[in-house]
Image (cartoon, grey):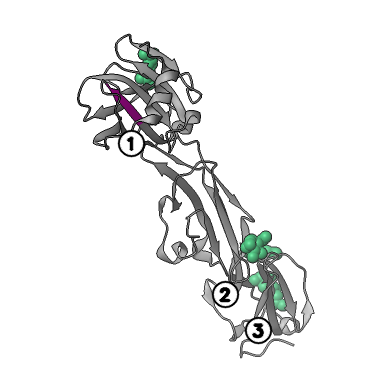
Amino acid sequence: MALTGRSWLLLSAAFLSTGAEISVTPEPEQPAEGDNITLVVHGLSGELLAYNWYAGPTLSLAYLVASYIVSTGDEIPGPAHTGREAVRPDGSLDIQGVLPGHSGTYILQTLNRQFQTEVGYGHLRVYEILAQPVVMANSTELVERRDTLRLICSSPSPAEVRWFFNGEALPIAIRLGLSPDGRVLTRHGIRREEAGAYQCEIWNPVSVSRSEPIDLTVYFGPERVAILQDSTTRTGCTIKVDFNTSLTLWCASRSCPEPEYVWAFNGRALKDGQDHINISSMTAAQEGTYTCIAKNPKTLLSGSASVVVKLSGESPPA
Ligand SMILES: *[C@@H]1O[C@H](CO)[C@@H](O)[C@H](O)[C@H]1NC(C)=O
Ligand SMILES: *[C@@H]1O[C@H](CO)[C@@H](O)[C@H](O)[C@H]1NC(C)=O
Ligand SMILES: *[C@@H]1O[C@H](CO)[C@@H](O)[C@H](O)[C@H]1NC(C)=O
Ligand SMILES: *[C@@H]1O[C@H](CO)[C@@H](O)[C@H](O)[C@H]1NC(C)=O
């Protein structure tokens, strides 16, 4: 009888399978998109008339990739043929330039001279060559302890994710803020030591790709506002100054960004915007309390420090 792909497909449905000892393995085992791959068949026995290849979980015509007649080498493409498949005389299936969409279950069905069929199952997973992911932040300028950081590693591809902080693995404390899939990083009450460059990297067995860094600034302070004279802290102290000599007072604090400084003398504001004041010639009129107020424009916090300045003991000339 003349055996065509269609006719034996109908036939095969009428005969019971003799049980699966056939195995199908992809070569290479973990193919990347674009590879030429082969679904290699092992364990074929007897004299075979024909092969049917299915790309799908069942022996359904909709999944038929091709039927192959061994004696003639004729290949009849089925509905699931993507134009890249070819059956080899030994039953293996070549796929040229395989795509992620080719992933899934494959079934080989064989027909022997006794019109008995056998099936073998295989699984193909095609990995994407990953495009560069992007880290997205809901804000890159945060206020310490007040703001919540949220970073998202954005990539359309299914892949594993890992993060880097200043080029190193993420510190444990920060890692605790990762979502179960690793794609979202959330930190409530962000800390200054968590400011820096964040990157995410996605990877699969065939490729790896790291995002550009995103730089995070954490604003804090002012803290430890202090008044200095000659680089020495004088906060809270009484400074004695000789008559007709000069004095420079500096204001310092821990703050990000640099705060705005305002000086006050006996409660009256002096001119703004300087981190120091000069008393060029000390007289009784300059005696009093000098206060520095540091205001952080980002955190909207402020702090202050004061010193008392007096003429030194030797009585000033009248
Ligand atoms: C796949 O096979 C085609 C045809 O033989 C060849 O031109 C191409 O370079 C191969 N591609 C790879 C990635 O090996
Ligand atoms: C960033 O996202 C977190 C979590 O959704 C939210 O609580 C926080 O208010 C957001 N921050 C900003 C600056 O939008
Ligand atoms: C203050 O010092 C300057 C220079 O040291 C001197 O010329 C001036 O006379 C002094 N003034 C008084 C009031 O002592
Ligand atoms: C204060 O004195 C210092 C050193 O003499 C000088 O560099 C600075 O410009 C002065 N600042 C003001 C506000 O006069």
Please tell me whether mark 1 sits on a helix, a strand or a loop: strand
Indicate which disc, 3 or 2, sits on the residue closer to the N terminus. Answer: 2
The quarter in which the N terminus is drawn is top left
Q: Which residue is mark 3?
A: 309
Give the spatial CA distance, label 3 vs label 2.
11 Å
Give the spatial CA distance, label 1 vs label 2.
83 Å
Q: Amino acid at mark 3?
A: Val
Q: Is mark 2 within 8 Å of ligand 4?
A: no
Judge left or right: residue 290 versus residue 200.
right
Q: Is residue 147 above or below residue 288?
A: above
Tags 3 and 2 touching, CB below 8 Å: no
- Mark number for residue 121? 1
Q: Amino acid at mark 2?
A: Gln
Residue occupying image coordinates x 33% and y 36%: 121
Residue 162 visible (yes or no):
yes
Q: Amino acid at mark 1?
A: Tyr
In this rendering, which labeled residue sits more in front, label 1 or label 3? 1
Q: Over which residues does the magenta segment extend?
A: 108-112
Residue occupying image coordinates x 75% and y 84%: 266
- Tell me the quadrant of ligand 3: bottom right
Q: In x, y percent, where is residue 51?
A: 34, 22
Q: In x, y percent, where is residue 77?
A: 45, 18
Please tell me whether mark 2 sits on a helix, a strand or a loop: strand
Indicate which disc, 1 or 3, sits on the residue closer to the N terminus. Answer: 1
Indicate which disc, 1 or 2, sits on the residue closer to the N terminus. Answer: 1
Q: Please give the count of numbered marks on the rendered protein.
A: 3
Residue occupying image coordinates x 68% and y 87%: 316
